[in-house]
Image (cartoon, helix red, strand yellow):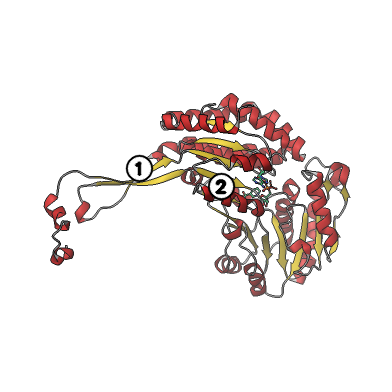
Amino acid sequence: MESQKKVIERLRAAFRSGVTIPQHFRLTQLKALLSLLEENETQILEAMHKDLAKPKFEAVLSEIDLVVNDVCFAINNLHSWMQPNYVGTNLATKLDECFVRREPLGVVLIIGAWNYPLQLILLPLIGAIAAGNCALMKPSEISAATEKLLADLIPRYLSQECFAVMCGGAEETKQLLENRFDHIFYTGSQAVARSILQAAAVHLTPVTLELGGKCPCLIYGRLDIKAAAKRLVWAKYFNAGQSCVAPDYVLCTVEMRDALLPAITQAIEQFYGSQIQKSVDYGRIVTDRHWDRLIDLLGKSEGKVVIGGEIDKEEKYFAPTVIIDLQESDALMQEEIFGPILPIITIESLEQGINFINQREKPLALYAFSDEPQIVTTVLERTSSGGFCSNDGIVHMTLPGLPFGGVGASGMGSYHGRWTFETFSHRRGCMFRGWGLERIGALRYPPYKESNLSW
Ligand code: NAD
């Protein structure tokens, strides 16, 4: 296998040659990426099924179609994104042409996580290509089938001079990070993000960190309980709870909880049937180690399991589970659950719910369920989170017009749609001057006269 150094040198030489700059090249690569997705859908679905038993519908919706939509959006808008933005001038610069030009950063590194193994590599790649960069991709070794498929397909469709995939886990990634990149785009845990930042600091490399955390779902006031339960169950148990934007826990009053529980039971049965383990629409936990972590978390919890709790290690099956009567100190409330366990924490007032959220790290997503607009607005205005969605979960991240990313401990920077293009671009402030207006310009030359300042 080609060494890391050689691959990076190859990408850097390609970038320096200027091959990625023309719009035509970027469009060709984006269209090649589209062909990759269209011509290999079956293989991609098989790989993700091998990795996570991803139901076909979920894989198409949240991985393939999401990337296809984003790449089409980039193809359709690339020309306008690449245009300079002209800015206003003042008296002294009246005859000048002043504009912001988007320029590529160079060779960028994209490191992905395993839970959405396709889109977490390809969505950033779309913006990297659109902005004219070369890119090295490092998919997660945990979703091994998709990792290998990406390593096989990308060189077959995209320019091998400009784009490459490297496989491997923590050790290989640490080695990669010793090299100089012009941007590092990392998706994964907060713990690893700290070492990414440290490695980036050595070369003063800018980073985007797409991290996780505990996304709250605050349910309050008047609303249609059955509809709320369906949307909550869908968002929580999609990909067997292994979504960075899955509702991590629910905050609601005791009365709301007692009304919600039968509606949640009903929604689970309606979605996955009475024998959930046999449902083709319910995924699996990615590895034994991740399954063990969930069992450990549940075992340490002082709460009461009221829905689900069934497990089967051989199949890495973990039933959709709801747990109540937890303390704030409960293990389940100390870290991101990242699995199909839903704690319901009771509150006595909206104020208490808002305080509960604000006492913790800023989440990647915050959900407010209520039919009363005043309640939704109050939650939005009094809290901070990467993204926000009222009366549903996850869906806000499917729109290319909305920036997707964290704030505080849930990440830095954002992407999707034009935002990815911006992430991988340098905004160069440019001024084209001629030789006119020299008499006005001469007022700034020494020997200085204070009276000239009034100009
Ligand atoms: P992870 O941090 O273990 O791994 C992510 C990547 O980092 C992998 O490619 C892995 O090979 C590499 N890696 C692992 N250890 C490393 C080390 N010591 N040094 C350098 N690289 C290392 O994360 P994960 O378990 O794959 O992902 C789960 C986390 O990612 C959750 O917190 C989840 O919320 C978050 N996530 C966030 C988003 C988002 O868009 N914000 C999306 C998916 C997942």
Q: Residue at x 81, y 62 (%)?
A: 323
Q: Position of residue 147 (x, y in %)?
A: 68, 35
* Rendered residue at 31%/50% (across/down): 87
* Residue 320 visible in the snapshot: no
Residue kind at label 1, given as amino acid type: Pro
Label of residue 59 in the image: none
Is residue 308 rendered to the left or right of residue 432?
right
Question: Circle 1 is placed at which residue position?
Answer: 84
Q: Quadrant of the N terminus?
A: top right
* In this rendering, the label closer to the viewer, 1 or 2: 1
List x then y, in percent, for residue 394: 64, 51
Marked residue nearer the N-terminal end (1 or 2): 1
> Quick one: label 2, few (<14), some, or many (20+) residues within 10 Å?
some
Q: What SS does tag 1 mark?
A: loop
Locate residue 92 relative to residue 356 in the image: left or right. Answer: left
Q: Which residue is mark 2?
A: 399
For residue 253, say whether it is visible.
yes
- The residue shown at (62%, 67%) is 372
Q: Quadrant of the C terminus?
A: bottom left
Quarter location, residue 97: top left
* Image coords of residue 299 (percent x, y): 85, 59
Q: Compared with residue 91, is residue 186 higher up or lower down, i.e. above or below?
A: above
Tell me the crowding category of disc 1: few under 14, some 14 to 19, or many 20 or more residues within 10 angstroms, Cα based: some
Measured in 3D between alpha carbons, the distance from the residue under mark 1 to the one under mark 2, in whole angstroms, is 25 Å
| Residue 230 drawn at (x, y percent) | 73, 54
Name the quadrant containing residue 116.
top right
Q: Which of the pair 331/245 is nearer the observer?
A: 331
